[in-house]
Amino acid sequence: MGEAGGGAERREHPRLETKLEARVIADGRTVAAETLNISEGGILLAGADFPSSARVRLEIELAELGWHSVDAEVIRRGDDATGAETLAARFARVATEGGREAIQAFFEARLGPA
């Protein structure tokens, strides 16, 4: 997505393109998904039939760190080039059952300390 004035990066955290198993939970439903990319602040998921809720709980399998949950705010919905439904979400600032800390540890293991 381009920006006027040179396209400067606005993201606070670097993104890591990786395929991780995930689940989106809202409105009494659980929907399977897969990450397209993830950062310490948010995530882009691919899947189908995502809940329409503005706030969701995400469960993400962070490789060797196992499954972790984090609350998130949906910021965008769309489709990717293959026609799969996408959901972009910002992780809640308040830690959810250690989910934010696990995501930070996942990044440190791959990219080194911030």
Image (cartoon, rainbow, N blue to C red):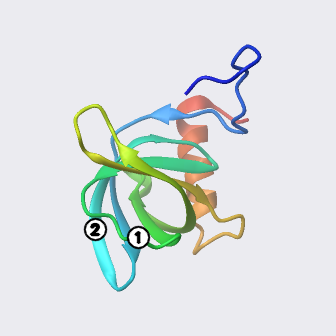
Of pointers 1 and 2, the one earlier in the residue sequence: 2
**Residue ID for mark 1:** 52
Determine crowd level at label 1: few under 14, some 14-19, many 20+ residues with C-alpha closer than 10 A.
few
Task: Specify the farthest residue to the bottom.
Answer: 28
Q: Quadrant of residue 65?
A: bottom left
Amino acid identity at mark 2: Val
Q: Does residue 95 appear to the left or right of 58 in the view shown?
A: right
* Mark 1 vs mark 2, CA separation in Å: 12 Å
Examine the rendered structure and indicate whether residue 112 appears above or below residue 94: above
Q: Does residue 12 appear to the left or right of 51 in the view shown?
A: right
- Residue 102 image offset from top left, x and y in percent: 56, 57
Task: Specify the farthest residue to the front.
Answer: 4
Examine the rendered structure and indicate whether residue 13 appears above or below residue 56: above
Please name the residue shown 45% across and 66% down the image: 58
Amino acid identity at mark 1: Ser
- Location of the N terminus by quadrant is top right
Q: Does residue 41 appear to the left or right of 114 in the view shown?
A: left
**Residue ID for mark 2:** 31
- Residue 43 image offset from top left, x and y in percent: 50, 49
Please name the residue shown 35% across and 86% down the image: 28
